[in-house]
Image (cartoon, helix red, strand yellow):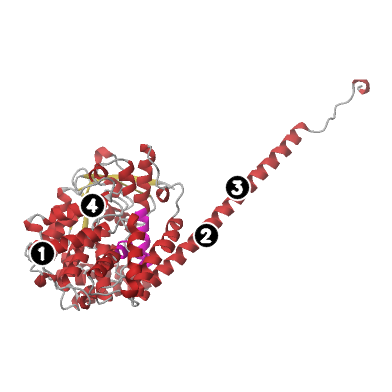
Amino acid sequence: METKVIYFTVNGRPEQAEFPVDCPTQDVKDLFRSAAEAGPHDILKLYNPKGNIINISPSLEPNSPNLCYKLEVVAADCNSELLGAELAGALGFDLSSMEKRLQGLEKKILIEAGETPAVVYEMKKQVDSFREKLESVEHLSWLGLFKDLSEGTHKPSPFYHKRTLRKTREECEHVREKFLQMSSLEVSEEVRQYLKTPTFDNWQWEDAEIMVLLQVMYTDLDFIPTFNIEPEVLQQFLFEIYRRYNNIPFHNFKHCFCVTQMMYGLIWLTDLRSKMDSIDLLIMLTSAVCHDLDHTGYNNAYQINARTELALRYNDISPLENHHCAVAFEILERTESNIFRNLSMDQYKRIREGIIKCILATDMSRHNEVLNKFKSILPVFDFTNKDHRDVLMMILIKVSDISNEARPMEVAEPWLDCLLQEFFNQSDVEKLEGLPVTPFMDRDKVTKPSSQTGFIRFVLLPLFIELANLFPCLEQHIIHPVRKALDYYTEMEKALETEQQNRAQSENAAKSKEAAGGRQDSQTDAGPDTSKPESQST
């Protein structure tokens, strides 16, 4: 298949796109949108080396790195609530112009063809539908209108390997500006309710929007008045959290959000507000927000085997989790981002102790220890017992941390792709550095289904089932989806094994046929002996 390569820059960062010459125009635009990490309503502008705007289409002229195109993203205006044609204009649509062009096209076709094709009627219907949608909404908030919760899942960005590990200043400031623009807007009730469910689709939301949703969680759990948290301090805290999550495939800011959102959903589903103090809920939510801060994509086994700075600093004892805690309290030490600054010394001490316990519990090497402790107290669990509550909090953050398979498959499966990408990156480095290769991360040994079936069967389900023993309502919300995921990956694994067996049989049959053909050729080359004895020659 013939392809073309286009070189361009996004915010000064060099990129290149490769696509088939017969690729649909929309696919090419989606490719550029993904490279720019632009939102669905952002406008893309592509300039040629002369500075002229050109169309993003399959007909783009191939170029070289020395003659790059320049891609710019123009964000939709989120400052004002616009209605009808005004909003359409802000989003780059001119409905009147579209309708006039459509009428002209309809007349031209009618003259030349004698009748109007069905496709024109369909286009008119879509324009009318779009106008009706814009003009029938009385109150438009950025998060309420622009997020169609039924829209399809957006796959994770494939460009992590081309980005710096730590976010650039420009990257952070761009997101910060959008976050502050949106932070005072009203979030629709539909989104607020959706945010409380395990089915929430994180792939629909950009980083700035995610920060707004985290702000909603702190607000709707009444943490703002209860703990006297100033809104601007919460915003600065959330920005610092965003800034300290790195550009890696899995343990990134979106993962932080997913874990926090699942924790938030569990709090509502199990009605923990009536069973635990607000300070415990604050500990759990903040622990989820902070639990993987400054993760670099290499697990504790790598840190210890490679004798990294973290492993040396923490004496090989949960180096990553200790580091995540340290970064969290480094952020909280700054007055402008300390959401606990108006609490008493005793309250702060309790929160610090609780956050450290929760984040350290996410070290999977402690999985059995924490689970067995929970199982031992489950028959006599008492919400008035602080030790019991502490163990439950550790279980809840563990469940939230590894809860992707409890989500719908279209949300969960892209996360598995991200995780495997990060795993394979680590095993590649381990091989290069001559370190022990972590078995479940080896790209030469692990398949997508094999990575999940054992994990779901022996880690996820036993953990989730014990939590559901305390909260039976979770059976339908997190255990049923995980069982479905196990069935899905089990079937995938069987199909893969069957495919491998068929391929092996085909290869063996081909080799046998080739060998038989070789023997036959050998016999043919030798041929029958037709020469006559000399005495019989004439």
Q: Secondary structure at mark 4?
A: helix
Q: Earlier in the sequence, mark 2 or mark 1?
A: 1
Q: Position of residue 128 (x, y in %)?
A: 26, 75
The amino acid beneath tag 3 is: Glu
Q: Earlier in the sequence, mark 2 or mark 4?
A: 4
Q: Nearer the viewer, mark 2 or mark 4?
A: 4
Residue indicated by mark 2: 495
Q: Is residue 524 left or right of residue 300?
A: right
Is 481 within the magenta? no
- In the rendered structure, find residue 322 and report the number of the disc placed on it: 4
Q: Are marks 2 and 4 in contact (CB under 8 Å)?
A: no
User: In front: 328, or 499?
Assistant: 328
Q: Secondary structure at mark 1?
A: helix
Residue indicated by mark 3: 507
Q: Nearer the viewer, mark 3 or mark 1?
A: 1
Cα gap from disc 3 to disc 1, whole angstroms? 71 Å
Residue indicated by mark 1: 346
Which of the 4 quarters of the picture holds residue 516? top right
